Amino acid sequence: MDRMQHLLAESSALHRHLCPRQVLGVRMGMLAAELLQLELPQSDRRLLSLVETDGCFADGVAVATNCWVGRRTLRVLDYGKTAATFVDTLTGQAIRIHPHPRARSMARGFAPEAGDRWQGYLLGYQRMPSHLLLVDQRVILQQSLERLLSRPSARAVCQICGEEIINERELLHEGSILCRPCAGEGYYRLEAPSMAQTVQPAISQGRLPISSPTR
């Protein structure tokens, strides 16, 4: 309990308050340490955390594991779920953890003094045993761990827009190197016409096959 309170204090310092999702993030990180038999927060980069939403929850996971976006040990996958997968990059083991479907309804029973539901979640999530609060599942990554981690020293240049691509995130089309936006996979589009825009429709219709570089 003392260790959890220390981690919660660190997490709340990032937001100037403590909320239930921070508690969930910290509890998931602590459970991951137990299941993977790792000492967390880590002092190296052995653990990779894949969180399925951003915000307070992600910071709770980061504090409990010492996985951070800036250290390339935490990735945010915007699935809108309060869940995370923890990967031991040494053994390849991966465990996905999410809240128990009944965690919300059970939380108030562990915090009878709570004045409202929010306070009940905040206190209850701290007091509930892990098997009632969380569900853990062994998973197999759809993408190879090598591909996820990549080589941070790798560099490439998109042959359409000319921008640099790092971390082996370039795509290949008939021998040409493309960044994802120029390959039609971008989250934005240019206001002014460009060479990239002429390529995107054909790719989206499947006429231009795109693949990741073979490693």
Image (tube, rainbow, N blue to C red):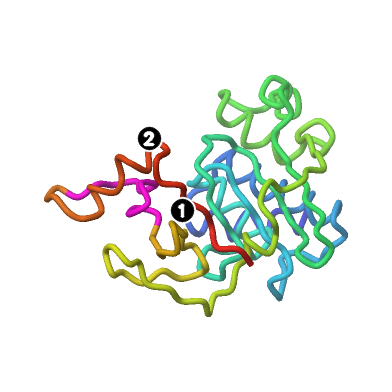
Q: Amino acid at mark 2?
A: Gln
User: Of residues 42 and 27, which is closer to you in this image?
Assistant: 42
Is residue 34 a member of the stretch shown in magenta? no
Question: In terms of sequence position, does the residue under pointer 2 or pointer 1 come before the other?
Answer: 1
Q: Main secondary structure of the magenta part?
A: loop
Task: Residue at the far bottom: name it.
Answer: 153
| Chain part drawn in magenta | 180-190
Discs 2, 1 touching: Cβ within 8 Å: no
Mark 2 or mark 1: which is in front?
Answer: 2
Mark 1, residues whose alpha carbon is within 10 Å: few (<14), some, or many (≥20)?
A: few
Horizontal side, residue 97 vs residue 165: left or right: right
Residue under numbered circle 1: 15
**Residue in the foreground of this view, choosing between 87 and 66:** 87
State how far apart marks 2 and 1 are (Cα). 44 Å
Left/right of residue 52 with respect to residue 48 in the rendered view = left
Q: Is residue 52 above or below residue 64?
A: above
Residue underneath mark 2 = 205
What residue is rendered at 69% in x and 19% in y? 105
Image quadrant where one finds the C terminus: bottom right
Q: Residue at x 82, y 43 (%)?
A: 138
Judge whether 150 appears above or below 15 on screen: below
| Disc 2 packing (10 Å; few <14; some 14–19; many ≥20) | few
Q: Does residue 91 appear left or right of residue 144 in this picture? A: right
Residue 198 position within the rendered picture, expressed as x and y whole percent measured from the top left: 23, 47
Q: x and y percent of residue 175 in the render?
A: 45, 64
Observer-nearest residue: 58 or 124? 58
Res. 96 mark:
none
Q: Residue at x 38, y 60 (%)?
A: 179
Q: For numbered disc 1, what is the local secondary structure?
A: helix
Instruction: Give SS at disc 2.
Output: loop
**Three-letter amino acid code at the position of disc 1:** His
